[in-house]
Amino acid sequence: MSRFLRMMLPLALSATAALAVDPPPVRGDVDLAVSFDPRPLAELDADAVAVPIFDGEELATALGSASATASPAVAAAARLGLLPAKRFEILPLVAPQGFRAASLWLVPAGASDGLDAERLRRFAGAAVHELRRHEVGSLTLFLRGGVPGEAAAGAAVEGALMGLFDAGIHKTDGRRSRMASLRLAGIADTPGARAAVGRARGRGRAVNFARSLAVEPANYVYPEVLAEHARALAREAGLEVEVLDETAIQRRGFGGVWAVGKGGGNPPRVIVLRYRAPVPSAVTLALVGKGVCFDSGGLSLKPGENMHEMKADMAGGAAVLAAMKMIAAERPGVNVLGVVAAVENMPDGRAQRPGDVFVGYSGKTVEVLSTDAEGRLILSDALAYAVEQGATHLVDIATLTGTVIRALGDHRAGAFASDERLYAALERAAARTGERFWRLPIDEEHGEGIEKSLVADLNETGGKAGASVGAHFLRAFTGGRPWIHLDIAGVAWPDDKVSYRDKGPTGAPARTLAELAHALAETD
């Protein structure tokens, strides 16, 4: 079928209608009512007041005039070896003399030099974790240091909301934090600070939305359920939404999506969200997410150990949905297109086989060598579609390779870029969010194995440097547009945790994707 005919097919072939139905539950959603408290530290009367303590400073510097009554307790803790040895570990002082708070939490926060928003996020997250552990009801964060008040307020609220996320969404013991409000002290209550808090609440909830999707079992979140979440998001946020069902996917030529998804018990979906800038913009940023709702590896079956975590192979798609949620609320000055290819990769009798060849949305033919390299197949269609839809800049986000974990561990995402200006914008965005990336190469040699198929235009894999090979394959479908590939296999569900995040899905890099839209608007 010609590309023209595909574009002219009636929308009735697609499950596009944003039907007025109840959305699926977001079980990890939490929110906080945030207020400002102008009183000095000694007058704050919460169940707990958390105070950052900097390396080498005197207690009087941190606690002010009331420090003399707290000093004996701290000295006693030091004699008993109870002072925290690590950053963000907490020393609770119960009923401290000279303070109205029921408990005062001293939180080591590193050196005062170089204090930034990310450390304040972690400070707030550490305090919330302590609160959850002790079932404390009210918390005040006393913010101090060199971070301006607006930035400090936003970082603290983001950290607190992300710290409240509980991955135990299907546990029946009913244990959930009672915390519903947060007070901020030590900074002025200004219109700018209130705006920063509002934005931070939206971002924190959006990140937890992505985490909720990624932690849900695959029998709860499969492609159509992911599409229902997108429809609900669009209704709530005022975005345009289109969902292509299995009929539209086949008729419109999404050969890569169909090759992977046809073996799943739940049929594939292609989810499209559109945000239009409030003023005309020449920039359309496409965010393209891998939405593999469960990845068994297909016929190239994965080992059974830890396969249960493959429910989170849709973390890139979840991050795109969360980023679109933020973008709709924050209204950056560029157009944004969100595309999520949602499938299950299963070894059904209809599943693709090693050696199969399909025609992708771009018109290129691809030979499948391993059915466990499925993410790049669905992304190739989604990227080609985004180019056809007028994207001027492309970012794809995927839990693509184990190679990137071996290279970078689980603290940084691998980043591959075809354009220096776009990568510089990503770096600016990441500096604001605290999410970390490391640029990796796409050398000509990385494409040699991909380009040696005997029967098709491309192999879908080939070569030792798996992360770079995958990126090289994806670049073939970007139409020469400025493009970044983010391999988030390590950061999406890391073994380690930080203070505002328990073990489990992180929602990364949703905040950076939203911030990237603002960074591009600044240079448009």
Image (cartoon, rainbow, N blue to C red):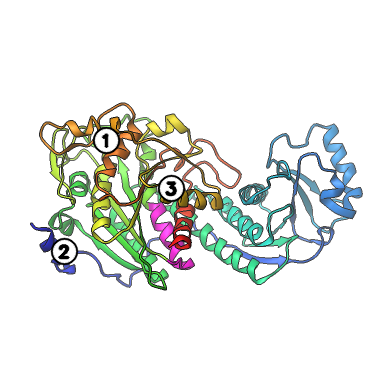
Q: Which residue is mark 2?
A: 7
Q: Foreground residue, 343 or 327?
A: 327
Q: Is residue 388 above or below residue 293?
A: below
User: What residue appears at the point 52 percent right and 46 percent down from the top-left corner?
Assistant: 435
Q: Which mark is residue 510?
A: none
- 325 magenta-colored: yes
- The reply to whether the C-beta atoms of the residues labelled 2 and 3 are less than 8 Å apart is no
Q: Does label 3 or label 1 sit earlier along the sequence? A: 1
Displayed quadrant of residue 151: bottom right
Looking at this rendering, what residue extends furthest in the top direction?
464
Q: Which mark is residue 372?
A: 1
- Name the kind of residue labelled 2 in the image: Met
**Disc 3 and disc 1: Cα gap in Å?**
29 Å
**Disc 2 and disc 3: Cα gap in Å?**
32 Å
The mark lying in front, picked from 2 and 3, is 3
Residue 507 placement, left or right of 175: left
What x and y, as percent, mark residue 477?
24, 47
- Name the kind of residue labelled 3 in the image: Tyr
Displayed quadrant of residue 14: bottom left
**Disc 2 and disc 1: Cα gap in Å?**
31 Å
- Name the kind of residue labelled 1 in the image: Asp
Q: Foreground residue, 142 or 104?
A: 142
> Looking at the image, how many numbered discs can be counted on the residues?
3
Residue 5 placement, left or right of 301: left
Q: Which residues are magenta?
A: 318-333
Q: Which residue is mark 3?
A: 423
What x and y, as percent, mark residue 429?
50, 53
